[in-house]
Image: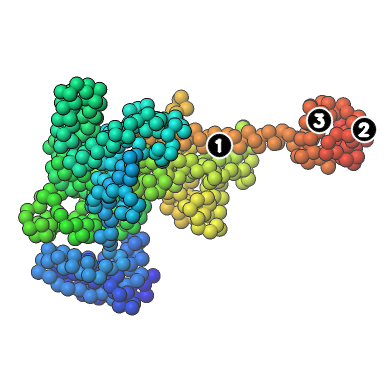
Amino acid sequence: MNPKLSELRKKAMALPLLPGMYIMHSSNGEIIYIGKAKALKNRVSQYFGSQNNHPEKVRQMVRSVDDFEYIITDSEFEALILECSLIKQHTPKYNILLKDDKGYSYIRVGAGDWGKISYALQKRDDGAQYIGPYKSSYYVKSAVDEANKIFMLPTCSRRFPQDFGKARPCLNYHIKQCMAPCTGKVKPEDYRENVSRALEFLKGGSNASVKQLTEQMEQAAENLEFERAARIRDIIQSVRRMSDRQKVVSNKVLDEDVIAFFSDDGKTCFQVFRFEGGRLFDRESFIFDSGEPESDAEEFLIGYYTLRRDIPKNIALCDGLGDLENLTRWLSEKKGSRVYVTVPQRGEQAKLVQMCRSNAAEALAQQKGATVREYSVLEELRETLGLDKLPEYIESYDISNLAGTENVAGMIVYKNGRPLKSAYRKFKIKGFEGQDDYASMAEVITRRFEEYFKAEKADEGFGRLPDLILLDGGRGQVTAVRGVLERMGLDIPLFGMVKDDRHRTRAVTSEGGEIAINSRRQLFTFLSKMQDEVHRFAIGYHHQRRKSTTFKSSLTNIEGVGTVRAKALLKYFRTIENISRADLEELENAPKMTKESALKVYQYFHGE
C-alpha cells in the first residue's frame, strides 16, 4: 500500500475537469507513467481510489507513485500528440514500450555447385551469397519456404557432394518437394538451374516468374527438348498453386493493416497482419502485462505507428482499440494524407479481424503451454459460466463409497485444459461413519483449503487457489460446499456437473439453476472427459481401500505380521486356506518369517 495514497487522492480530486496530460513520478523523481485524459480529475482520481478493481500492473504502478504533475490542453487530440512525444522521449516504465529493434533478414544462397537457399538474420563472411536486407522476416521465411518447395530444393542438413548415396531420400522426395540430390543422380547443371529459377522467383515474385518460365518452356519445346519442357511446365503449375494458396479471402483484400488483441489473466497479445497485393505480407505479435485494456490498446497503437515509417491507407481494428476519431486524425497527419481506420462488423474485413484475433489468442496460449484448441474450450467454458477470467486451473471432486463404508474422495486438476496428474489428491473421509455425500464433500473441501492456508504459495498443488471448482453432483453438493467457501472467506467460482440417464454429463449446475451444455459439442466433450476422469480416480481409490481392508482382516490382524510379511506368505502358500493347514515347520521355512512370527500364525489358526 502506498503511504501517500490519501494525499495523492486529495490532490487528484482538486484537478480540473479539462482535457490534458498527467505524468506520474517515483520517489526519486523518475517518470514512470504518462497518460492523457478527456477530464483530468475523473481519470487521475481513479488511480488513487480503491485498489481492488485495478489490475495487478496498475496496482504496482500506484504503489510506486510519489507525486504527479499535469498539463492542460485545448483538446483531447492535443493531449494525444503531447502523450506520443513525451512517451517517446522518456520511455516510462509502466507505459507499453515498443523498441524499434526488429532486425533485417536476408536470403542466403550457399556457395558451390550444391548451395542451398535459406533464411538468415545476419550476413556472415562464409562465402555464401546474401540477398537483402528485407524488413519483414515473415516474408523472407515464407518466400524461401515457397521457393524451396516449388523448385524442389533440399532443406535438410545433408551436405553435398559429401553425403551422396549415404542414405535413402527423405519424405520430401516422395511427395515431390525435393529433387533428392542425395541420391547422386541429379546433374549439377540441373540443380544450378533450379537454384537460379528459385532466386528469380524470390526477386521477381510469382507473376514475373511464371512469365519467364513460360518463355523457357516454349523455347525448350521448340528445340524438341520435351522432357525439359515438361519439367518447366510442372514448376509453372506449382508456382500458380502456391500463389493461389497464399491469397487470403479474395482479391478484394485491401493493402492494409489488420490489428486485434486478446487479453487473459494479466497478459495481452496484440497481433498485426499486414496485407499487400491481396496477400499476407507480414505478421507481428506483441505480448505485454495487462493494465487497463482501453489504455493499453491506445498506447500500443501509438507506439507501433510512432516507430513505423510507412503507414497504410487502411487500418482495420477489432473492438476496444482506442478512440478512432483522434487516432485517425493523428495517423493522417503523420502520413500526410487521409488514413481510414475502421472496426468492421460484417463481410470479408470482419473475417480478417476475427482471424487476426484468433492468432492473438493462439500466441497467448502457446506462451502458456496450451494449444489453441485447449484454449478455445476454456474460453467457451468461461463464456458459458460467466466467469471473470479464463479457468486455467480447475479442480474437480467426486465421492465414492459402498453402502456408507470406506468413504473416500478424489480431487483431480486440469491446468491449461490438460490433466495435471502430479496435482491429483486422495482423501479418506474421517469426520463421520455412514453415507452422506453432502457432508463428505464439505469435509473434503474444508481440508483442502485448510492445507492452502498452511502451504507456501505455489503454481500448483495445495499452494494454489483454483480458478474454478467443479463437483460431481448437483445443487445439494454445490450448496454444501458454498457454505464452506464462504466461512473460509474464499470467492471461487463453484459449479456441479449433472449426468443424464445414460451417465453422460448433460448440464452444469449452480445454486441458481442449470446451464445446458448439450448443444456445445467441444465443451460437452471436455466436461464429460473431466467428469469421467474424476469418477475413475475416486473409484480407483475406493477399490484400493476395500482391497486393503479385506487383506488386513485376515493375515495382518495376526500379531507380528505386517503387510510385507502377509504378502510374502500369500505368494509362498498361494491361499489363506493353505496357510491355515501348514504346520509350524513349514511356516518357519516360509520367506520373511521368523520362529516367533511362525508360532503366532500357527496359533492364530490352530489355537494354543
In the rendering, which numbered label is found on residue 572? Answer: 3
Residue 581 drawn at (x, y percent): 87, 26
Residue 309 drawn at (x, y percent): 16, 57
Amino acid under disc 1: Phe
Asked whether, in this view, residue 255 is left or right of residue 283, the answer is left
Mark 1 vs mark 3, foreground winner is 3
Name the residue: 31% across, 67% down. Answer: 93
> Mark 1 falls on what kind of element?
helix
> Mark 3 falls on what kind of element?
helix
Among all residues in the image, which is located at the extreme bottom? 28
- The residue singled out by tag 2 in the image is 585
Amino acid under disc 3: Tyr
Residue 456 drawn at (x, y percent): 53, 59
- The residue singled out by tag 1 in the image is 537
Amino acid under disc 2: Glu
Q: Is the residue marked by circle 2 packed among few (<14), some (14-19), or many (20+) residues within 10 Å?
A: few
| In this view, 409 is above or below 287 | above
> Mark 2 falls on what kind of element?
helix
Which sits in the foreground, 603 or 458? 458
Query: Where the N terminus falls, by quadrant?
Result: bottom left
Name the residue: 45% across, 25% down. Answer: 501
Quarter occupied by residue 7: bottom left
Quarter occupied by residue 49: bottom left
Query: Where the C terminus falls, by quadrant?
Result: top right
Question: Is residue 413 shown to the viewer in this render?
Answer: yes
Residue 207 drawn at (x, y percent): 15, 36
Contact between marks 1 and 3 (CB within 8 A): the answer is no
- Alpha carbon separation for disc pair 1 and 2: 44 Å
| In this view, 181 is above or below 33 | above
Q: Is the residue marked by circle 1 packed among few (<14), some (14-19), or many (20+) residues within 10 Å?
A: many
